[in-house]
């Protein structure tokens, strides 16, 4: 098993998953490109994982409230979009885009409802080149999908959707 840690959150992945911390200093392009937190490669797909933790124990109350307000008002959507896009470009340039890519966003906040998470998922899907949303003419031309799946979760909904990759606060 492999465990990812971001702040005081941990996600455990089964053996066989190739896990990379992606937004660290060794990336080299953080000065001009945004990056998701983790890239996880499975045998049949790749997951880009972005984690936001407004309820981190060290977070200031006013900052947490502002984050939730910005999240609800779509002010974070562009940042989340660019994190996917730039991470995809980096993976493409390194010739690592031969599998379907999923984009999973974990917002570690108990204050967000399933409805709000669903709205943000729909908003992200509308901004990303989701294969299912392409016109039929493009589906025939594209040799591979850019984004296979996308979802926005809190800890509770993450653990329900991904019981084999549980997240917990440490």
Image (tube, helix red, strand yellow):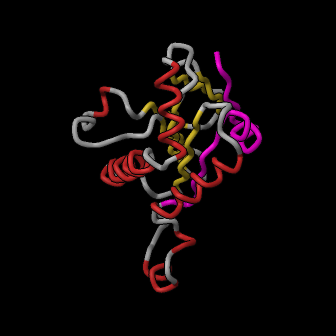
**What's the residue at 33%, 41% (across, down)?**
34
- Please say whether residue 65 is one of the residues in the magenta stretch: no
Q: Is residue 1 above or below residue 100?
A: above
Left or right position of 1 against 36: right
Q: Is residue 2 above or below residue 142?
A: above
**What's the residue at 47%, 68% (across, down)?**
144
Q: Quadrant of residue 8?
A: top right
Left or right position of 72 against 166: left
Q: Residue furthest bottom?
A: 137
Residue 14 visible to the viewer: no
Q: Quadrant of residue 41?
A: top right
Q: Quadrant of residue 83?
A: top left
* Magenta-colored span: 147-170
**What's the residue at 77%, 41% (across, down)?**
160
Residue 122: give x, y in percent of width and height. 58, 59
Q: Residue furthest left?
A: 31
Question: Which of 107 and 137 lies nearest the eye of the viewer?
Answer: 107
- Please say whether residue 163 is one of the residues in the magenta stretch: yes
Residue 32: give x, y in percent of width and height. 22, 41
Residue 108 visible to the viewer: yes
Left or right position of 95 against 111: left
Residue 117: give x, y in percent of width and height. 63, 47
Q: Is residue 141 above or below residue 50?
A: below
């Amino acid at each position: 098993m492999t465990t990812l840690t971001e702040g005081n959150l941990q996600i455990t992945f089964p053996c066989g998953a190739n896990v990379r911390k992606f937004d660290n200093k060794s990336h080299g392009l953080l000065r001009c490109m945004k990056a998701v937190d983790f890239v996880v490669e499975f045998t049949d797909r790749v997951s880009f994982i972005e984690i936001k933790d407004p309820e981190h124990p060290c977070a200031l109350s006013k900052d947490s409230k502002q984050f939730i307000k910005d999240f609800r008002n779509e002010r974070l959507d562009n940042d989340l979009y660019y994190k996917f896009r730039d991470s995809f470009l980096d993976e493409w340039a390194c010739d690592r885009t031969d599998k379907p890519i999923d984009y999973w966003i974990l917002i570690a906040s108990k204050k967000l409802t399933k409805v709000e998470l669903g709205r943000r998922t729909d908003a992200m899907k509308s901004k990303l080149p989701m294969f299912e949303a392409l016109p039929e003419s493009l589906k025939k031309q594209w040799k591979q999908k850019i984004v296979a799946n996308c979802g926005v979760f809190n800890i509770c909904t993450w653990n329900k959707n991904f019981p084999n990759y549980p997240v917990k606060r440490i």
